[in-house]
Image: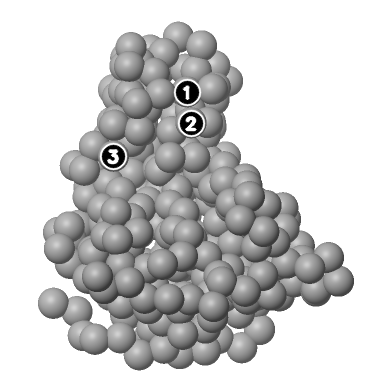
Amino acid sequence: MDLLDSPSDAEGPIGVFDSGIGGLTVVAALRELLPAERIFYIGDTARVPYGGKSRRTIERYSVEIAGLLLAEQAKLIVVACNTASALAVPRLKQIFNLPVQGVIDPGAAAAVRASRNGRIGVIGTRATIASRAYEQAIHALAPEAEVFAEACPLLVPLIEEAWFDDEVTGQVLHRYLDPLLAGGIDTLVLGCTHYPLLREAIARVAGPDVTLVDSAHNCALAVEDILRVRGLAAPARQVGSLDVALTDATEGFLRVAEQALELQIGDVKLRAVQAAG
Ligand code: DGL
């Protein structure tokens, strides 16, 4: 068996990764809920986006980044990327001998709790939507729920340009969301780590009768649970911290996210990965 062992030390960091910068929305939720925890975040900016790539490639990238987190003594791996969560979590669990938490199950559970009429919308990247991971997770909890899923590939670039409050973004959102709204959804899962940054614009288009479910906060709650159950929570005396590493020195959107999420990110480290392809 190709199990890789970790020290599983409560003082070790929570390892978090995303295809790029969007996973910092999960980091912000973790920092708020678990202020004593150290967090080591890796954004695979050299190979982002994952959202249009195949399962094989997304698995390969995810395994490589998780290995880098293990080298940082991570006690738990948080897959703060919906695309990698939808396609690579089973492989990561098979390979690494430490808890792996993705964002799909917590988001699906929160959506099922929130929905009153059982009509749930899900938006995400092409790969996330094509995987049907949200549908499966929702149906495992509520077999009678109706899921309306829509791939929204234009949203990530708009968010990375910080076009949060722009007419063009509003039009694109209408194009993607109108069919879901016509289906009568009362709950919408923001199934991509970038989307919480666009929450206000999405809420304006979706209207007051649709509850937005944010996988970031629900994932942080799931992490809190794992740490408690496994006795891995940081000692109360520990002062939490955040280290950020990227696989390519592309900081533009990092500073947008830092500001929007009110995170304090110091010097960014670099980690090498194999070339894309
Ligand atoms: N982080 C990805 C997600 O949450 C979005 C960006 C990408 O396509 O890599 O699905």
Report if the beta carbon of the residue with label 3 is closer than 8 angstroms to ligand 1.
no
| Quarter of the image that includes the C terminus | bottom left
Q: Which residue is mark 1?
A: 112
User: Residue at the right extreme?
Assistant: 237
| CA–CA distance in space, label 2 to label 3 | 13 Å
The reply, left or right, for residue 77 in relation to residue 119 is right
Q: Residues within 10 Å of mark 1 (few under 14, many from 20)?
A: many
Q: Residue at x 48, y 31 (%)?
A: 109
Q: Which residue is mark 2?
A: 109
Residues under numbered marks 2 and 3 in contact, where contact means CB atoms less than 8 Å apart: no
Q: Which mark is residue 133?
A: 3
Kindly state the secondary structure of the residue where label 1 is placed: helix
* Image x and y of residue 256, in percent: 55, 67
Question: Colour scheme in the image?
Answer: one colour
Can the viewer see residue 6?
yes
Amino acid type at image mark 3: Ala
Q: Residue at x 40, y 23 (%)?
A: 141
Q: Quick one: 17 or 100, which is closer to the camera?
A: 100
Residues under numbered marks 1 and 2 in contact, where contact means CB atoms less than 8 Å apart: yes
Kindly state the secondary structure of the residue where label 2 is placed: helix
